[in-house]
Amino acid sequence: MTQSLPITNRSRLRRLHQRGHFDRETVNAILDAQPMCSVGYIIDGKPYVTPTLQWREGNHIYWHGSSASRALRASRDADVCLTVAILDGLVLARSGMHHSANTRSVMLFGTAVKVEDPEAKLEKLGRFVNGLFPGRYEMLRPDHAQDLKATMVLGMKIEEGSAKIRTGGAIDEEEDYALPIWAGVIPVRTEIGAPVPDPRNIEGLQVPRHVTDFKMG
């Protein structure tokens, strides 16, 4: 049985309800496909949004940054809004009003909790690296105590939010379909390029498979 997030006053769609999705399978798939996210929070009564990278572990989502970051310090034990968005295409219609974009997005609400235990923090950072590059964390030099001290990891339970998805072509007014105006979709895709080695790599190093075979989602 597919689990779903509850529909709340904050998470429900006010319009275009057919684009809303609350099942965890859809939410998880979007979170797992795009590590880039934005976290919104309040500092001194004013709104801020910070871009960062996120990763999901089961029913929780995590992000990290500098322990000196004002944003992360303000987010700790505070209500936050985290969003992930993927642009899949630009939709050209026969009127400016009906131009659109094909997107997949998730918006989550919750309380950010700091991962305090050093061992738990180390474990989660390892999962973050290996989630993108399987097996890499074990190849790296061990983290120094100062590395962990300088890094803050925040997380929250995935229990309120929704996904929103738009697919397909232009949806024009019926009479506009007779106009001699091109309409359609320009697909947009994230392209993974060829790896660029660090010029200070030791000569003769073999490129690991998690680099040559890298892909997202």
Image (spheres, helix red, strand yellow):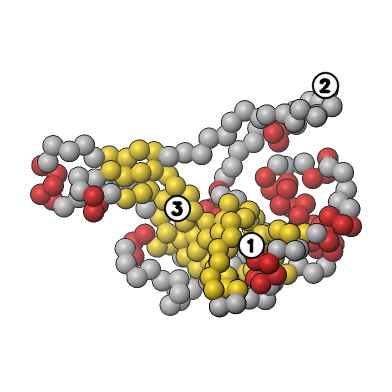
- Please state the total of marks drawn on the protein image: 3
Tell me which corner region of the image, top left, top right, bottom left or bottom right, holds residue 208: top right
The crowding category of the residue bearing disc 3, from other C-alpha atoms within 10 Å (few below 14, some 14 to 19, many at least 20), is many
**On the picture, is 138 further left or further right than 98?**
right
* Upstream in sequence: badge 1 or badge 3: 1
Vertically, is 64 above or below 141?
below
Q: Secondary structure at mark 2?
A: loop
- The residue that mark 3 highlights is 104
Q: Position of residue 159 (x, y in %)?
A: 56, 71
Q: Are marks 1 and 3 in contact (CB under 8 Å)?
A: no
Which is closer to the viewer, label 2 or label 3? Answer: 2
Q: Position of residue 24 (x, y in %)?
A: 52, 62
Residue at 23% across, 54% down:
97
Mark 2: amino acid: Gly
Tell me which corner region of the image, top left, top right, bottom left or bottom right, holds residue 125: bottom right
Cα distance between the residues tagged 2 and 3: 42 Å
Mark 1: amino acid: Ile
Residue at 80% across, 29% down:
200
Residue 152 visible in the snapshot: no
The quarter in which the C terminus is drawn is: top right
The crowding category of the residue bearing disc 2, from other C-alpha atoms within 10 Å (few below 14, some 14 to 19, many at least 20), is few
Vertically, is 177 above or below 194?
below
Residue 141 visible in the snapshot: yes
Residue at 16% across, 52% down:
173
Q: Secondary structure at mark 1?
A: strand
* Upstream in sequence: badge 2 or badge 1: 1
The crowding category of the residue bearing disc 1, from other C-alpha atoms within 10 Å (few below 14, some 14 to 19, many at least 20), is some
**On the picture, is 120 further left or further right than 12?**
right
- The residue that mark 1 highlights is 61
Q: Secondary structure at mark 3?
A: strand
Q: Position of residue 49 (x, y in %)?
A: 55, 63
